[in-house]
Amino acid sequence: MNVKNQLRDGLFFQNPVTVQLLGMCSVMAITTTLFNGLGMGVSVLVILTLANIIISILRKIIPNNIRIACFIVVIAGFVTIVDLCLQAFLPDLSSSLGLFIPLIVVNCIILGRAEAFAYKNGPAASAMDGIFQGLGYTMVLVIMCVVREFLGNGTFGGGLLNGGDGIRSLDHVAISGGTVKSNGGSGNLSGGNGIISYDIDLSGSLELTAKAGSPNGKALSQRGNELELDTIKDKLGPGAKVTATDADGKVIDQVPIPRPVEPEESSSSSDGGSAAPSAPASPLPGLTVTDKDGQRISYTSTQSGNTLTVCVGRFTASFRISLAALRQLRAEGIETITFQTILCSTTLSVDELLAMGGEDAEAVLTHRLTDSSLTVG
């Protein structure tokens, strides 16, 4: 028995995953967090070592023609013991690994070592083979878990060492409109970030709350630094409010954009009674916004330079304007119109719209979630 050679083979030259390509199903399925990888690796190591020892002891009395069935019975016994121990003492890990613990019964690594080594060698050498092959399997699992967890979640150690990020992108994060809450996770070494990216683009009538993780996390991490909200103020629409808080919920920066007050319409019936409530009045003549059922809804409009922006807090809405109203807006210096809903923003050229229809035509721009469609007629 050459322990040094067995160790070298188990870790490198005969590694069950990288060289023999065994057990690939469980390797690809459970390597999502470090603790999943450690749990699966240690489970396989224990089962492989114990199964090798028992099979080696019984190798002279196991009939050759039914040896595979005997191997499976021995392995199944140890798998059951490990599975029950995980359920009793580590229920979260057991739930996370799921069926992959029972499936160790037919794992090719364990069956392969039983056939290739334990059935032909003594108990001591078989035990060493099980330990070193199990260590090689665990080593590959841990490496894959660290890489996949960091790239996928931005965490290390299942978020217990490094807190996870709420929203993470390597190059660009863009949020326009809607209500968003993004919290960084807490960790032992460092906290996560509410939002982290090389470039963070916030615009529209957005209500965003970003919370830093504990310790040392950032609420809005752009290029490694906390985003200064004053730099995005000009991009925000009416009613927008962006808030950055620390791990305790204390506000560290905030930018609110007031919403314009719309005129209220009231009417009374001819006999002095109150009439039924009417649809919200359009602040701009000839322009209406309707919901998915065709009912008129209120909106806000702002002008910045030669651009008119119309905002509505809906996922689905239609922007309607007559070409006569467009000509009036063009005469007032408006060159482009931007229509914003929660998930979609569309900018149209007034001149191009005027060229598409006749005197009595109407332009209808409809947003459905992230899709937009335009008709003129």
Image: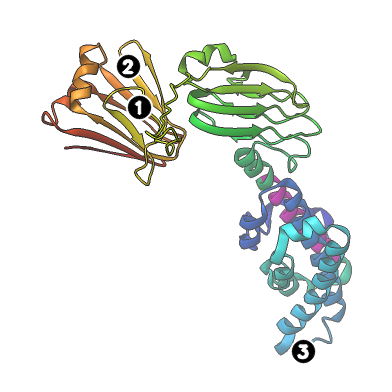
Q: Residues within 10 Å of mark 1 (few under 14, many from 20)?
A: some
Image quarter for residue 361? top left
Answer whether labels 1 and 2 touch (C-beta < 8 Å). Answer: no
Give the foreground label among 1 and 2: 1
Magenta stretch: give its range: 126-143
Q: Is residue 277 left or right of residue 200?
A: left
Q: Amino acid at mark 2?
A: Thr
**What percent of the width, then of the height, locates residue 192?**
70, 31
Residue that badge 1 annotates:
282
Q: Which mark is residue 61?
A: none
Q: Which residue lies most toward the left here?
A: 358
On the image, the x and y values in percent for residue 297 come to 40, 35
In the rendered image, which quarter contains the N terminus? bottom right
Which quarter shows the C terminus?
top left
Q: In the visual, does 130 lie left or right of 355?
A: right
Q: Quadrant of residue 155?
A: top right
Residue 186 lies within the magenta run: no
- Separation of marks 3 and 2 at Cα, in angstroms: 86 Å
Q: Amino acid at mark 3?
A: Pro
SS at mark 3? loop
